[in-house]
């Protein structure tokens, strides 16, 4: 099993997710999650805004199969939009369609999304549709296009590791796009598995959308790719208001501030809520080097204990299955 597969499996372990929700903030989760409630995340956004950093806000949670949970998530996101407006924050929304009913009923999901997008549109707040695994990719794209026909404040994510991502870059070139490598475990029949291939596609898609697209959010912690982008935009006279760099809350904070000081637009992906464990494990799966990029305070004795317990529990589970 690869390190990526290992972290993906941890992210999907319900026992560990439940334990993390219960004990996460005793174990250092606050270094990668900006709060458990709206008041806390608003304070985190204000601190980032004061440093010249914009934010995209994610109410953590996905793969919801009960309407009550989807409706609760919708109300939470609507409340965040109201606070962004009332507190005059430099922030927008990132959401996952599966949290709002994608796996329950498409019409139900559409109505939830429409209510969110409509309110945000009233306040001129952008809404980004985070993309999830391949099975949910095209249903999410279809919902996005339906809403874009009525509202102009929506965009999405293109994951470079999918074979079809070049086609999707072209399909959505007139949208504001966040470009990423991809963080879910996908079958070799639909996605590249080799890092070299994924990086090559990622860079090519960044260049294409910078030249032909509406607005490009370049989401990476990889300084080599960031330096490549800096040279590319300089060579092609691409204005800085056509793109931004994005990183995750709590990761490479010194580089985030450095990019702002250099005059680049910068946006931090700000997650909040108790459902943090799966999110964090997928960030490690996406790029295991992220372990070394999280701010130092997250790796205290308690947090190392959490990761060790998680790893041990998973490995014991696998060994037990093999012995049966």
Image: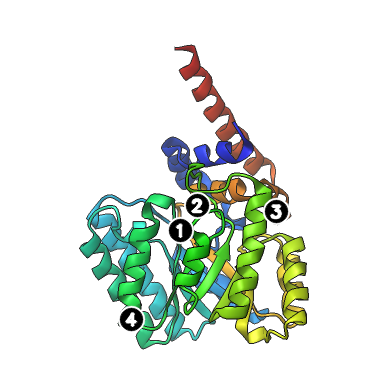
224 sits to left or right of 221: right
- Specify few, some or many for label 1: CA neighbours under 10 Å numbering under 14, 14-19, or 20 or more: some
Residue 315 place in picture, x, y as percent: 56, 26
**First-in-chain label (1 vs 3):** 1
x 38%, y 65%: residue:
141
Q: State whether residue 99 is above or below residue 303.
A: below
- Where residue 297 is drawn, which disc sits there? 3
x 59%, y 44%: residue:
193
C-beta proximity under 8 Å, tags 1 and 2: yes
C-beta proximity under 8 Å, tags 4 and 2: no
Element under label 2? loop
Element under label 4? helix
Point out the frontmost of discs 4 and 2.
4
313 sits to left or right of 38: right
Element under label 3? helix
105 sits to left or right of 299: left
Residue that label 4 marks: 119
Q: Is residue 28 visible?
A: no
- Where residue 276 is drawn, which disc sits there? 2
Residue that label 1 marks: 273
**First-in-chain label (2 vs 3):** 2
x 63%, y 86%: residue:
241
């Amino acid at each position: 099993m690869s390190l990526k597969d290992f972290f993906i499996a941890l992210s999907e372990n319900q026992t560990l997710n439940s334990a993390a929700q219960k004990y996460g903030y005793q174990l250092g989760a606050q270094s990668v999650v900006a709060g458990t409630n709206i008041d806390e995340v608003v304070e985190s956004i204000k601190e980032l805004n004061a440093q010249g950093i914009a934010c995209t806000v994610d109410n953590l949670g996905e793969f919801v199969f009960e309407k009550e949970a989807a409706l609760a998530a919708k109300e939470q996101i609507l409340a965040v939009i109201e606070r962004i407006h009332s507190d005059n924050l430099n922030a927008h929304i990132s959401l996952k369609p599966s949290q709002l009913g994608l796996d329950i009923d498409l019409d139900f999901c559409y109505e939830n999304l429409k209510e969110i997008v409509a309110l945000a549109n009233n306040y001129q707040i952008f809404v980004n549709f985070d993309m999830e695994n391949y099975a949910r990719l095209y249903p999410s794209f279809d919902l996005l296009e339906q809403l874009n026909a009525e509202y102009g404040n929506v965009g999405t994510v293109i994951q470079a590791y999918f074979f079809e991502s070049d086609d999707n870059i072209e399909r959505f070139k007139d949208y504001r796009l966040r470009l990423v490598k991809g963080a879910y475990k996908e079958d070799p029949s639909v996605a590249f598995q080799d890092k070299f291939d994924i990086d090559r596609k990622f860079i090519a898609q960044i260049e294409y959308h910078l030249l032909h697209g509406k607005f490009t959010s370049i989401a990476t912690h990889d300084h080599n790719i960031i330096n490549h982008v800096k040279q590319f935009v300089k060579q092609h006279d691409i204005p800085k208001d056509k793109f931004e760099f994005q990183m995750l809350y709590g990761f490479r904070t010194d580089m985030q501030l450095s990019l702002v000081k250099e005059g680049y637009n910068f946006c931090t992906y700000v997650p909040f809520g108790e459902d943090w464990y799966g999110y964090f494990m997928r960030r490690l799966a996406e790029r295991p080097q992220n372990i070394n990029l999280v701010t130092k305070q997250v790796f205290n004795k308690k947090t190392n204990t959490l990761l060790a317990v998680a790893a041990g529990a998973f490995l014991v589970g696998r060994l037990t299955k093999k012995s049966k």
